[in-house]
Amino acid sequence: MSAEKIIKSQARKKLSDGGFAKALIVLGIIAVCYMMVECISSVFYYINEAFKHSDAFEFILQVTSGSITTICLLLLSPIVIGYFKMLYNEQKEYDINDAVYYLLNFKRYIKAVMFVFSLVVRLLLPTAICYIPVISLYAINAFMLKNSMNETLFTITVIVLIIFSTTAFLLYSTRYFLSIKLFCEDENQQMSYYFLTSKIIMNGHANALIKLVGSFVPWLLLCVTVLPLLYVLPYMTQAICISGNWLLQLSRNGLEK
């Protein structure tokens, strides 16, 4: 049996041991929180439509809306880290206390926010670089070709470039895959420890992770409605967390030898 099948089997077993309902509860809380952020963004949109007087006003409102939304998402990020902490826990059953771990202590909460901020900062420039082909195509079509490019050809080219850019970004971001696991184990380390250690361990393991995530593509294609997503999302995230536990344990066993 391949490693991917073993990991998936373990993920299904973890969910079947009473964990599925708990995972959905935490995901539901996360979804509600992020829907509230979306509501805030919608309020700014309606304000803009109702009181739009000038381009300058619209620009200021958009910048304000974007800034507030970004800050809210960052402040809510410890809930997501808590969800992963719950899934990374290798106990037989999920512990809901893990999901709210970073919300119950101000110092831990701030450290979790700082961790997510550090991770995002490390990914911003690589993300921009990976998506340069897509941005360049839009710029060429708008400014050089004056939007004269055939619409069908433009759409197909954009889709191909997005797939290429997303693949490149995923390959790059795998280096930080274990940083969340390391942070969930011990939030008292220096920030550089999580990312540097993850990069060292993930060297040579990126393909295995991409293969595992890629095996979920057929599942994700089924998620055209919300109902399949309610099963696929806990299943996929649990499998990814089990993979993280495997990789870290293999690394530590190697160091011990």
Image (spheres, rainbow, N blue to C red):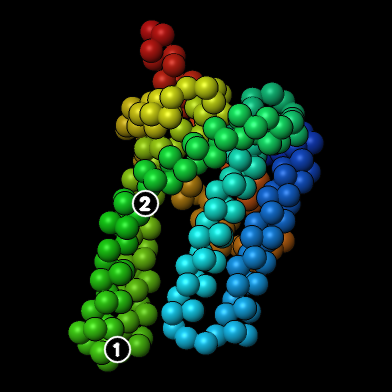
* Residue 117 position (above or below residue 36): above
Q: Which residue is mark 1?
A: 147
Q: Which residue is mark 2?
A: 124
Q: Secondary structure at mark 1?
A: loop
Tell me the crowding category of disc 2: few under 14, some 14 to 19, or many 20 or more residues within 10 angstroms, Cα based: few
Left or right position of 101 against 130: right
Residue visible at 20% across and 84% down in the picture = 144
Q: Amino acid at mark 2?
A: Leu
Q: Earlier in the sequence, mark 2 or mark 1?
A: 2
Q: Position of residue 150 (x, y in %)?
A: 30, 89
Camera-side residue: 235 or 145?
145
Q: Position of residue 149 (x, y in %)?
A: 27, 88
Residue visible at 68% across and 61% down in the picture = 35
Tell me the crowding category of disc 1: few under 14, some 14 to 19, or many 20 or more residues within 10 angstroms, Cα based: some
Between the C-alphas of marks 2 and 1, the distance is 28 Å
Q: Amino acid at mark 1?
A: Asn
Left or right position of 112 against 205: right
Which of the 4 image quarters holds residue 104?
Answer: top right
Camera-side residue: 240 or 48?
48
Q: Position of residue 18 (x, y in %)?
A: 79, 36
Residue visible at 27% across and 77% down in the picture = 139
The residue positioned farthest toward the top in the image shown: 257
Residue visible at 33% across and 45% down in the picture = 172
Camera-side residue: 92 or 4?
92
Camera-side residue: 243 or 10?
243
From where the camera sits, is residue 22 visible?
Answer: yes
* Residue 244 position (above or below residue 228): above
* Residue 117 position (above or below residue 62): above
From where the camera sits, is residue 14 visible?
Answer: no
* Quarter in which the C terminus is drawn: top left
